[in-house]
Image: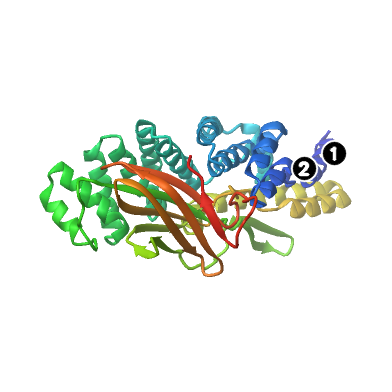
Amino acid sequence: MKFMWHYRAVLLCAAVLLQGCASSTPLNNARNQFFSGQPQAALETLNTQSISKRNALLALLDRGLIAHTAGEYQQSIDAFKSATALLNELDYISVREQTTSLVTNDWVTAYKGEYSERLWIHTFQMMNFLLLNNAEGAAVEARQALQVFDEHGADLKNDWYSRSLIAMSFEAAGKPDSAHIEYKKLLDDSGRDKGIARRAWQNAKRLGRAQDADAFKQLIESETSSGDDGELVIFLQAGSIPPKISGEIYVDPSLYASFPVYPDISQPNLSIAVEKDGKNKSADVVNVQLVDISREALAARGKGITTKQLLRLAAKKNIAQSVSGENELLGSLLTVAFMASEVADTRSWETLPAHVSLVQIPLSSGKHSLNLLVSDSINDYSISLSNIDIAPGVKTYRSIRVGAGAPRIEEPISTELTLPTP
């Protein structure tokens, strides 16, 4: 009976090697379609092809982001709502799944997302609702995003983009006091960023908080704002986030631990300029590199990963030694299988952009045509925004992606893009 159990352990490891670490072909196909500029084809793949339960969350995250990029904002909202519901289920981990992963690897478990990825579900939802002029929906997502910050804020606090959107969503929903609290915290933590200050200044003026308004005013280049002014807010995404890679630590020559890490890739921030009628137009910009936030969030749970890895190594070594005592050949095979199965779980939300930028452009009421000039130090993009209708005192929202994941233009002219009206 004991021999049969040992034999089953070898078969379990072999099964994991064959399927546990295998990537999802439909998921990879959809991602390839997305990165080749075909978001609708990618959505069709995700909507019609079967994806394993282990990767169900990744499929929903990709579906939500790809739909957002394609301008299908309601479809994006539905996908992200399903992702949130699935996360609530996945937080109750099955005993069987955990036990299996202790003698194989984490690929056999359902992907549950990083802290940063859980936050960005709500970030994209806030964008979706604002783009659909549903400020109340955006405020609901802002409150849920704050719950993520309450749990993991020390590791996510440098995500100025998401935090700006939280304040912006409260402001849009007619909750200026809540917005004021978030703006103040954000400006204190960000080193008084100019890209955030104008909005904080305007909100403080509306609330009659003169002292705060005066402090915020000192951070902006120009305070001129007539009652006829509105604003164009652009949610800009560029490039693609680098995928996780494996890191290894050898405990002894026969066993090593493998764990996921984000590569330490240094990238310059985006350079963003706005032109109107051939002249530079003032704009406030908030830039964030998502891999920086991802790396910090993953490192924060590194202690838990290390603890589980050590438990797994101890379990594998004990099983192999026990088997070797009865059958040396089977024990050797089991040791080899255990080593081969020690593979880091490098799954991640790979359709995320590398950069996110909040571009805020004050404009008078009426129709405007602008050029958005974006450079990532390798590629230059010129995005034409035509006939943008600005209402007095109202914020108009647009979302754009450039570089990897940008929708393919049927008849491109160099790198110049024309942004359609939603």
Observer-nearest of 297 and 145: 145
The coloring applied to the image is rainbow
What label does residue 386 carry, if any? none
Disc 2 residue type (three-letter) = Gln
Task: Identify which residue is drawn at 37% across, 38% down.
Answer: 142
In percent of the image, x 24 and y 63: which residue is there? Answer: 221
Q: Are marks 1 and 2 in contact (CB under 8 Å)?
A: no
The image quarter containing residue 47 is top right
Q: Horizontal placement of 177 versus 340: left or right?
A: left
Callout 2: helix, strand or loop? helix
At label 2, counting other C-alpha atoms closer than 10 Å, the crowd grade (few under 14, some 14-19, many 20 or more) is: few
- Callout 1 amino acid: Phe
Quarter of the image for the N terminus: give it. Answer: top right
Image location (x, y in percent) of residue 78: 53, 30
Q: Residues within 10 Å of mark 1 (few under 14, many from 20)?
A: few
In the figure, is residue 188 to the left or right of 70?
A: left
Does 1 appear above or below 182? above
Asked if residue 350 is positioned above or below residue 125 in the image, the reply reads below
- In front: 157, or 181? 181
**Residue 271 x/y as whole percent:** 44, 65
User: In the image, residue 83 lies at what x, y percent?
Assistant: 54, 34
- Between the residue at mark 1 and the residue at mark 2, the CA separation in whole angstroms equals 24 Å
Name which residue lies at 24% across and 45% down. 181
Give the x, y percent position of residue 340: 77, 54
Q: Where is mark 1, residue-wise?
A: 3
Task: In the rendered structure, find residue 19 and report the number of the disc placed on it.
Answer: 2
Above-or-below relation of 393 to 289: above
- Report the side of 94 relative to 394 (left or right): right
* Towards the viewer: 106 or 24: 24
Task: Between residue 356 and residue 186, name the one nearer to us.
Answer: 356
**Which numbered disc flags the more N-terminal residue, 1 or 2?**
1
